[in-house]
Image (tube, helix red, strand yellow):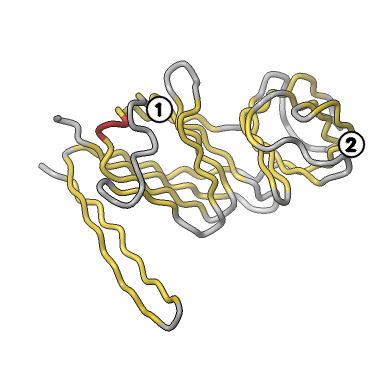
Amino acid sequence: MSVLARITSQIEISGLMITSACTRTAPGCIGHKIDLGAASSGVLDARSDDDTGNIACTDHGFDTGAVVDAYWDGGRRYGMNLTRVDADNVLLDSGDGDVLPAQGTSVKFCEQTDLDTDFAGDLMKALVAHCDQRACICLKTAGGTVELVLDLVAGEAQSWIDDGMAANPIAGDTIAKATLSQANADNAATIQLGILYNSTP
């Protein structure tokens, strides 16, 4: 039995109206629809270096050892460790992505949610990701190496389809899990991740 993936788009540019529909089929699929709570919010009130800083905040609910993604206007850093936590402060360290912003910048941070998501990148036929808030999805190997980062703009889907213009972004990689986070401190978010793959090559 084959599963169908259909990606449709309507594009207006320079007086042109283009409607397109792309379909792919494969025997395997993965579909996640995950609700995430609101992010925490604070101010970067001390900055030791490009990947270490203290966030002054209250009511964050985090414990030492949590792994978070941090967001600010114009940037994002994922996989940061909370190395010290008290009632009004959290110390963020390491991670990857953009360097931390200037001291005094407002920062949102959200603990990563892990998803068990196993498939071989070479077998992928289609991928689509969407969130109703600004968000980040990282696809990782079993050892935790990040192979693909999807930076999601609120309400805008990202997609890839086999035999399209772009090469397979995770060719040669074996994905074992995904981590999710979102950047809105006032509202919860819903992330959707769909993958079509050849489960019987």
Judged from this view, the residue extending furthest toward the bottom is 15
- Label 2: which residue? 45
Q: Position of residue 95 (x, y in %)?
A: 65, 27
Which of the two discs, 2 and 1, sits closer to the camera? 2
Q: Position of residue 142 (x, y in %)?
A: 42, 18
Q: Residue at x 84, y 38 (%)?
A: 44
Q: Give whichever of 5, 10 is nearer the camera.
A: 10
Q: Position of residue 101 (x, y in %)?
A: 79, 41
**Residue at disc 1, secondary structure:** strand
Q: Residue at x 42, y 76 (%)?
A: 12
Tell me the kind of residue under disc 2: Asp
Tell me the kind of residue under disc 1: Asp
Question: Does 183 appear above or below 94?
Answer: below
How crowded is the residue under tag 2: few (<14 C-alpha within 10 Å), some, or many (20+)?
Answer: some
Tag 2–tag 1 contact (CB < 8 Å):
no
| Image quarter of the C terminus | top left
Image-based side of 110 in relation to 3, left or right = right
Q: Residue at x 82, y 34 (%)?
A: 55
Question: Does 16 appear above or below 2?
Answer: below
Image-based side of 97 in relation to 196, left or right = right
How crowded is the residue under tag 1: few (<14 C-alpha within 10 Å), some, or many (20+)?
Answer: few
Question: For residue 116, which numbered disc appears in the image?
Answer: 1
